[in-house]
C-alpha cells in the first residue's frame, strides 16, 4: 500500500455524505423562502406598475395645461393617498353629498365635509338618500355641470345587507345593489361597475370582497370613526348614460376620474385640512346654512310617481295610466264573461258580475316586492306617500272613461254577447287590486266615497303593512288582507317587505281588521315548498284577525323573470289546495269550506255565521249595501252596519262539492289548446 494514502483524512466527506439529506432540506428551504420573497415583491411591483400605467395612459390622452395639473393631482393621490384641497379648485365645479344614516354619524360627517367645501367657494348640496329618488334624478342630471358626487354611507346599518357585503348602497327604497330593478338605469350601472371594480371606500377593512366594518357585529367600532362611515366619491362631469362593463371602463375612463376615489384610511389627513379651513373661515357658516336650507326645500318638492320609463313599461303591459300615480286595466275575466265563457272566482264566491267589474288602483306604488307578483315589479316601491297627488274625482272619472273605452273595443268581436256588452258599459264593481298598495293613497276614503256615490261596490286589497290606514279606513263592500305567510321568516322570504318592522305591522294590520264591522277576507296564496307547511301558525293568525272569509288560492305562475325564482314546480295542484284547506279547517272550529272555483285553483272558507239553516249566504246584496252606505254617510258615520246586513244566498252551483266545481252553468266553458300566457286578472 502506498504510504501517502495514510496521510488523507476522509472523515469530513464521509460525514457530509451521511448527512446529505439535511443539506438538501436546507437548500430547499432557502430556495422556497427566496421564491416567496420574489412573489411578494412582484405582486407589489405589479400593483404599482398597473397604477402608473393607468396614470400614464390617461396623461397621453390630452396635452393641455389642465391635463398637466390633473396629472400632478394624480401623483399626489398615488403617493400621499389624498388630493390637496387647493388643487381641487382647478377642476371641481360643484359637489353633491349623498348620505344615508340610521344613527346620524354619516349625516354629521357629510355636514362637516360640506362646510369645508363651502370654504373653498364651491357650491355644495347635502341630500338624504331617504328623500332622493334615483329614477327621477340621476338620468336627468348627468348632463348638468356637476363634478363630484359623494356617497356618505353609515357602515353599521346602511352598508349591510344581511351578509355584510361591502359597496352596498341602501336608501329608503331598499338596497340599491341588491335590488334587481335598480341597475336597469343605465347611468347607475356605470356606478355599479366602479363600485365592483374599485373597492377603496369601506373603511380599509375589506378582505377578498368582504367588508369587516360593515358586518352586523360592528357594534364594537367607535361611532364616528373613519371605519364606521364609508365614503364613495364619483366623478360625473362627462358621464354618458350608457352601460358598460368594469373592464371597458378601465380602458376608456375619462382623465378626470383619476381623482374619483378617496381611500377612507387617509381621511385623517384630509380632516386636518378641513379643520384648519374651518377655523380660518367660520364666517361662512351662515352662508352654508342658508344653502342647505335651500337644498332641503328643493328636495321636499313632490315628484310624479310615474316616470317616463315607467310609463313606457306599464303601457306596453296594457295599462291605461291615469294622472301621475293611478292606472286601470281590463281583467281577463271581464273579457271572458263578455263572451259568456264564465266569470272569476269573485263571481262564484260573492256574486260579482265580472263583465261589469273595473280593475284599478289609485296608487301604483307598493311596500312589498312579492316573489309571485304578476307585474314583475315594474311598479315603484315606497313606505310612505312622497309623490305628487292627484284628486280622487279626476282619478275616478278617467278610470271609468278608460275602462269604458277598453270595453268598446269588444263591440262586434265574434262571441261577445250583446246584452253583456251593454251591461259592461256601466261599471258596477271596482276591484282595487290591480297593482301596488291602494291604501297608501292619502285620499283613499274620498275615493271610496265617490265610488259608493256612483253605486259602485268596492273590493279593496291591502298587503297588511299599513295598520293605521286600515284602522282609519271608511266602510268598504269587502276588505282584503293578503296573508302570504304565517311566520316572520317566511313572510320576509315571500313578500320581501320594505319595512324593517314588517312583522309587527303585519300583526297590527290583522288586529285592525278584526275591529271592522263590514266583510273582511284573508287572502292566502299557496306557494309550494314555501308556505304550505305552516298550518298551525295560519290557524293562530285566523284567531287574531277573525275574518269573515278566507280565500285559499294556488300561486299563479307568471313566467320567468329576474324578479322571481318561482317555477311551475311551486304551483300546487288543485287537489293539493283542497287538502290544505281541509287540514286548515280542522284547526279553526268556527269555519267551514263554503265554495270552490276549480278554474282559478281557489277555495273559500267561510265563518259559520254565514251558514243559516244549513244554507250558505256568502253572496252580497249589492243594492242593500248601497242603501246602508248611504245611511252611514247621511248620519255622519253614526249609523253603522255589519256584514250580515247585506249578505245574499249562495247558489248551489257555487258550493264546494257541487258537480259544476264553481262554474256558472249559464255560461259555456271554453278550453283552449296551446293558449298563450295571460297574467292579468284579479
Image: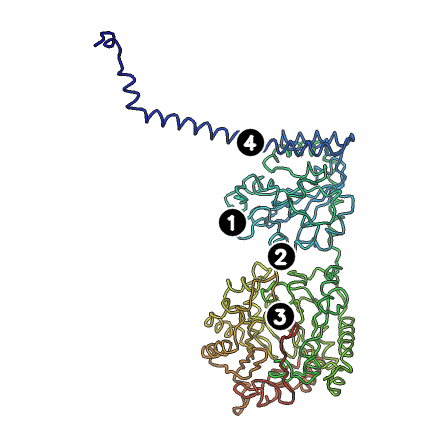
Residue for badge 4: 44
In three-dimensional space, the C-alpha distance between marks 4 and 1, rounded to whole angstroms, equals: 32 Å
Tell me residue 32's x, y (percent): 43, 29
Q: What residue is at 51 percent from the left and 71 percent from the top?
A: 541
> Of label 3 and label 1, which has the lower sequence position?
1
Which one is in front, 502 or 407? Answer: 407
Question: Looking at the image, do the residues carrying marks 4 and 1 touch, with CB atoms under 8 Å apart?
Answer: no
> Of label 2 and label 3, which has the lower sequence position?
2
In three-dimensional space, the C-alpha distance between marks 1 and 2, rounded to whole angstroms, equals: 23 Å
Which disc is residue 462 wearing? 3
| Disc 4 versus disc 1: nearer the observer | 4
Quarter-of-image position of residue 415: bottom right
In three-dimensional space, the C-alpha distance between marks 4 and 3, rounded to whole angstroms, equals: 58 Å
Q: What residue is at 39 percent from the left and 25 percent from the top?
A: 27
From the viewer's perspective, tell me whether residue 336 is left or right of residue 372.
right
| Disc 4 versus disc 2: nearer the observer | 4
Tell me residue 2's x, y (percent): 23, 8
Residue for badge 2: 180
Q: What residue is at 44 percent from the left and 28 percent from the top?
A: 33
> Of label 4 and label 1, which has the lower sequence position?
4
Residue for badge 1: 216
**Badge 3, how many Cα within 10 Å: few under 14, some, many 20+?**
many
**Badge 2, how many Cα within 10 Å: few under 14, some, many 20+?**
few
Amino acid at each position: 500500500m502506498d504510504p501517502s494514502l495514510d496521510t488523507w483524512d476522509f472523515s469530513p466527506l464521509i460525514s457530509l455524505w451521511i448527512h446529505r439529506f439535511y443539506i438538501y432540506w436546507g437548500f430547499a428551504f432557502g430556495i422556497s423562502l427566496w421564491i416567496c420573497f420574489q412573489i411578494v415583491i412582484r405582486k407589489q411591483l405589479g400593483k404599482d406598475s398597473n397604477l402608473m400605467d393607468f396614470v400614464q395612459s390617461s396623461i397621453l390622452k390630452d396635452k393641455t395645461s389642465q391635463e398637466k395639473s390633473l396629472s400632478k393631482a394624480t401623483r399626489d393621490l398615488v403617493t400621499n393617498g389624498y388630493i390637496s384641497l387647493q388643487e381641487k379648485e382647478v377642476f371641481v365645479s360643484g359637489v353633491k353629498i349623498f348620505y344615508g344614516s340610521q344613527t346620524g354619524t354619516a349625516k354629521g360627517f357629510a355636514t362637516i365635509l360640506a362646510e369645508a367645501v363651502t370654504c373653498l367657494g364651491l357650491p355644495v348640496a347635502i341630500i338624504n338618500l331617504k328623500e332622493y329618488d334615483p329614477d327621477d334624478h340621476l338620468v336627468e342630471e348627468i348632463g348638468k355641470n356637476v363634478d363630484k358626487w359623494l356617497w356618505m354611507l353609515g357602515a353599521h346599518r346602511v352598508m349591510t345587507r344581511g351578509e355584510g357585503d361591502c359597496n352596498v348602497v341602501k336608501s329608503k327604497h331598499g338596497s340599491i345593489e341588491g335590488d334587481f330593478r335598480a341597475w336597469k338605469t343605465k347611468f347607475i350601472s356605470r356606478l355599479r361597475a366602479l363600485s365592483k371594480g374599485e373597492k377603496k371606500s369601506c373603511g380599509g377593512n375589506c378582505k377578498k370582497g368582504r367588508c369587516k366594518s360593515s358586518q352586523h357585529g360592528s357594534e364594537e367600532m367607535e361611532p364616528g370613526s373613519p371605519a364606521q362611515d364609508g365614503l364613495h366619491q364619483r366623478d360625473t362631469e362627462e358621464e354618458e348614460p350608457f352601460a358598460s362593463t368594469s373592464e371597458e371602463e378601465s380602458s376608456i375612463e375619462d382623465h378626470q376620474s383619476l381623482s374619483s376615489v378617496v381611500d377612507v384610511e387617509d381621511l385623517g389627513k384630509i380632516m386636518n385640512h378641513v379643520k384648519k379651513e374651518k377655523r380660518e373661515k367660520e364666517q361662512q357658516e351662515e352662508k352654508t346654512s342658508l344653502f342647505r336650507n335651500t337644498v332641503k326645500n328643493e328636495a321636499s318638492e313632490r315628484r310624479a310617481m310615474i316616470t317616463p320609463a315607467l310609463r313606457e313599461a306599464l303601457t306596453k303591459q296594457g295599462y291605461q295610466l291615469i294622472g301621475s300615480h293611478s292606472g286601470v286595466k281590463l281583467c281577463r275575466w271581464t273579457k271572458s264573461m263578455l263572451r259568456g265563457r264564465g266569470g272569476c272566482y269573485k263571481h262564484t264566491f260573492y256574486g260579482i258580475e265580472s263583465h261589469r267589474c273595473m280593475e284599478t288602483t289609485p296608487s301604483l306604488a307598493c311596500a312589498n316586492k312579492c316573489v309571485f307578483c304578476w307585474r314583475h315589479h315594474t311598479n315603484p316601491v315606497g313606505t310612505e306617500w312622497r309623490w305628487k297627488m292627484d284628486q280622487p274625482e279626476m282619478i275616478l272619472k278617467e278610470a271609468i272613461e278608460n275602462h269604458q273605452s277598453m270595453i268598446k273595443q269588444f263591440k262586434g268581436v265574434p262571441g261577445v254577447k250583446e246584452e253583456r256588452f251593454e251591461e259592461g258599459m256601466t261599471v258596477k264593481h271596482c276591484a282595487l287590486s290591480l297593482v301596488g298598495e291602494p291604501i297608501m293613497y292619502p285620499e283613499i276614503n274620498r275615493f271610496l266615497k265617490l265610488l259608493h256615490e256612483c253605486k259602485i261596490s268596492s273590493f279593496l286589497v291591502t298587503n297588511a303593512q299599513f295598520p293605521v290606514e286600515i284602522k282609519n279606513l271608511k266602510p268598504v263592500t269587502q276588505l282584503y288582507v293578503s296573508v302570504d305567510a304565517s311566520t316572520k321568516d317566511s313572510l320576509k322570504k315571500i313578500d320581501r317587505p320594505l319595512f324593517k318592522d314588517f312583522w309587527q305591522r303585519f300583526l297590527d294590520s290583522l288586529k285592525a281588521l278584526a275591529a271592522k264591522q263590514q266583510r273582511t277576507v284573508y287572502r292566502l296564496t299557496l306557494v309550494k315548498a314555501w308556505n304550505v307547511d305552516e298550518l298551525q301558525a295560519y290557524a293562530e293568525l285566523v284567531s287574531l284577525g277573525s275574518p269573515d272569509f278566507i280565500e285559499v288560492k294556488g300561486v299563479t305562475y307568471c313566467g320567468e323573470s329576474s324578479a322571481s325564482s318561482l317555477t311551475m314546480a311551486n304551483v300546487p295542484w288543485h287537489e293539493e289546495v283542497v287538502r290544505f284547506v281541509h287540514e286548515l279547517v280542522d284547526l279553526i272550529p268556527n269555519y267551514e269550506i263554503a265554495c270552490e272555483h276549480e278554474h282559478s285553483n281557489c277555495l273559500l272558507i267561510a265563518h259559520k255565521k254565514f251558514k243559516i239553516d244549513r244554507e250558505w249566504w256568502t253572496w252580497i246584496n249589492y243594492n242593500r249595501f248601497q242603501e246602508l252606505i248611504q245611511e252611514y254617510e247621511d248620519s255622519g258615520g253614526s249609523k253603522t252596519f255589519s256584514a250580515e246586513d247585506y249578505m245574499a244566498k249562495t247558489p248551489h252551483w257555487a258550493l264546494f262539492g257541487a258537480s259544476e266545481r264553481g262554474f256558472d252553468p249559464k255560461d259555456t266553458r271554453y278550453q283552449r289548446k296551446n293558449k298563450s300566457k295571460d297574467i292579468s286578472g284579479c
